[in-house]
Amino acid sequence: MPKFRSFLAKARTLFGFATISSSASAVAPSSSAMDDLGTTLKTRICIIGSGPAAHTAAIYASRANLNPVLLEGWMANDIAPGGQLTTTTEVENFPGFPDGITGLDLTDKFRAQSLRFGTKIYTETATRVDLRATPFRVFTPERTLEADSVILATGAVAKKLKFSGSEEFWNKGISACAVCDGAAPIFRNKGLAVIGGGDSAMEEANFLTKFGSKVYIIHRRDQFRASKIMQERALKNEKIEVMWNSVVEEAYGGKVLEGLKVKNVVTGEVTDLKVNGLFYAIGHEPATKFLEGQLEVDADGYVVTKPGTTQTSVKGVFAAGDVQDKKYRQAITAAGTGCMAALDAEHYLQEIGEQHGKSD
């Protein structure tokens, strides 16, 4: 039953916003939510996203009486409302939960807190935006929103590899975040592996040596693309072994990952690697395609923000969380920038209110 209730809480509804209790029980959408399908809604702040950045922004904006609307998406980027945390089992590094909490339960608490303070949440995906003039317009398959300000918190999705067992052992030994999951008991004093050849792979491999008995870096080429200093740190670490010109062909095990079949692409030799953890370090893809070039993004597609703020290249549009953070990518740092975005948006709305002879 608990799993079924969690599923219902995530599924919610395709037909408007649904209010839920703190116990995460799903409630049918109100008739007013049903009636405004296909209409144009006006709001002071439209928040696009469903993770810690989005909900922190929503909580701050709601408490400031700005009546935000939050579009949490419906399987946007193939992830349930709640974002990447919904694909994580135990979260042990978010303050306030000394015994840990599942990712799904944590995102449910985010959502319940947003609702408590009056955020209107729509389980709809923003498919495109018009940021060329104010009010900004945000489009979903069900409706159009006109907003005086927009907070982008759409996140980024970790790139994965597909091979035999890759889906079966996802979150059962296979992860895309060593910092998030590496300290888990199942990885302590076990053999671990990292796939990648950039700075992130070097950093994660070094991090994992604190917990694993040995760490293998599996790289498909014969040299790394990482910076020299990061390569040196990894290559000088006695607990790290590099498997050059290699790819994973299979993951196997019982209830959790127990090993990998790793093929050398030059010799064709297959090695049976006894490891209990495999971590992807091959990059992330920010969810920015729907912006269609209307905001400045960097070479990797991350939204560019003014240093020390969440302000984007379009005044009145702000970005928070992993959609603009390619370095830290943690739930707690995303929440921090969500707070910043809400405060930045509030100050912006005060500014334009004064320009129009009124105050927020």
Image (cartoon, rainbow, N blue to C red):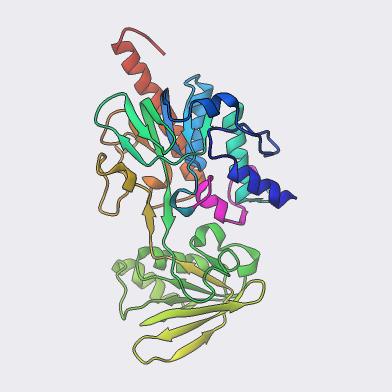
How far across and how far down the image is residue 68, in percent?
47, 26
Q: Is residue 18 left or right of residue 51?
A: right
| Nearer to the camera, 309 or 34 | 34
Q: Is residue 142 left or right of residue 292?
A: right
Where, quadrant-wise, is the C terminus in this rendering? top left
Task: Identify the residue at the far top of this view.
Answer: 357
Give the image quarter of residue 309. Answer: top left
> Residue at the spot x=32%, y=79% of the render?
221
How far across and how far down the image is residue 349, in percent?
37, 20
Q: How many marks overall? A: 0
How far across and how far down the image is residue 352, in percent?
31, 17
Up the image or down, 227 lies above or below 345; here it is below
Q: Is residue 154 visible?
A: yes
Magenta stretch contains residue 81: yes
Up the image or down, 342 lies above or below 206; here it is above
What's the magenta region? Answer: 79-96
Give the image quarter of residue 24. Answer: top right
Could you tell me what secondary structure mostly forms the magenta stretch? loop
Give the image quarter of residue 160. Answer: bottom left
Up the image or down, 315 lies above or below 303; here it is above
Q: Is residue 335 visible?
A: no
| Nearer to the camera, 235 or 328 | 328
Task: Identify the residue at the far right of this view.
Answer: 1
| Nearer to the camera, 165 or 140 | 140
How far across and how far down the image is residue 104, in percent?
61, 49
> Residue at the spot x=66%, y=38% of the render?
26
Magenta stretch contains residue 8: no
